[in-house]
Image: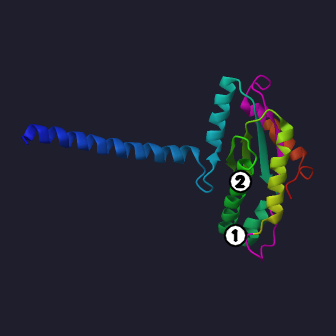
């Protein structure tokens, strides 16, 4: 094999290795940008972008906002490492509820102890069984036998219709108000 052919093959090999490494870096950056580091579910940035794309396509979905009740007590009495483990379990419970609902959708960690669920349905009544599954899972949850706190959440949900809402920010404020209005009424406890 002459030097010229060897140089071309080596350059091609080096280029392929470079592309492979570059793709791995892009994948890692995508994960850092759009996934919650603790739970592995999508993050608020992904949720905002996703909802923007739905608005551009004029597609409606049902959004559920969940705020964990009195979660600070878990962190204060059991420590942040236990609190982090409980947050991971909550994300897993929410994902299982969607998976068993026969609806397309996803979970996003909105921030702290708040989560969003996006369900591809225009029927709010189909969401109640999903919330009931979450409620049951929370009732059965205990991290360890001596855990003095039950997990519970307050829920607000509605249909996001881009024709009705001028922006997702306005809808977020609406669903947040519903969640606080329903605190104690449609509580997952």
Pointer 2 or 1: first along the chain = 1
**Image coordinates for residue 59, horizontal then vertical, percent:** 71, 27
Q: From this viewpoint, is residue 189 visible?
A: yes
Label 2, label 1: how far apart the Cα atoms are: 26 Å
Name the quadrant containing residue 1. top left
Q: Residue furthest left?
A: 2
Q: Secondary structure at mark 2?
A: helix
Task: Give the class, few, some or many, for how many residues have Cα within 10 Å of label 1's Cα (few <14, many ≥20).
Answer: few
Instruction: Residue 94: give x, y in percent of width and height.
Output: 73, 52
Q: Give the number of the disc on residue 18.
A: none
| Tag 1 residue | 79
Write the residue at 67% across / 29% down.
54
Q: Residue at x 73, y 48 (%)?
A: 98
Task: Give left or right: position of 96 versus 189.
Answer: left
* Residue in the picture at 34% in, 41% down: 19
Magenta stretch, residue numbers: 143-172
Q: Which residue is mark 2?
A: 96
Left or right: 48 as drawn, with respect to 123: left
Does the magenta run of residues contain 151? yes
């Amino acid at each position: 094999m002459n030097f010229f052919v060897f140089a071309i093959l080596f350059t091609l090999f080096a280029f392929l290795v470079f592309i492979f490494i570059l793709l791995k870096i892009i994948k890692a950056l995508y994960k850092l940008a759009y996934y919650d580091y603790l739970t592995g579910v999508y993050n608020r940035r992904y949720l905002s972008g996703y909802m923007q794309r739905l608005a551009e396509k004029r597609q409606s979905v049902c959004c559920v906002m969940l705020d964990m009740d009195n979660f600070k007590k878990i962190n204060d009495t059991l420590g942040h490492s236990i609190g982090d483990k409980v947050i991971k379990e909550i994300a897993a419970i929410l994902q299982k509820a969607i998976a068993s609902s026969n609806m397309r959708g996803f979970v996003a960690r909105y921030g702290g102890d708040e989560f969003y669920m996006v369900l591809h349905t225009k029927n709010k009544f189909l969401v109640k069984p999903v919330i009931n599954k979450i409620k049951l899972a929370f009732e059965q949850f205990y991290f360890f036998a001596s855990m003095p706190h039950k997990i519970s959440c307050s829920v607000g949900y509605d249909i996001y219709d881009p024709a009705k809402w001028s922006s997702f920010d306005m809808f977020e404020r609406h669903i947040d108000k519903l969640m606080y209005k329903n605190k104690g009424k449609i509580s997952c406890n």
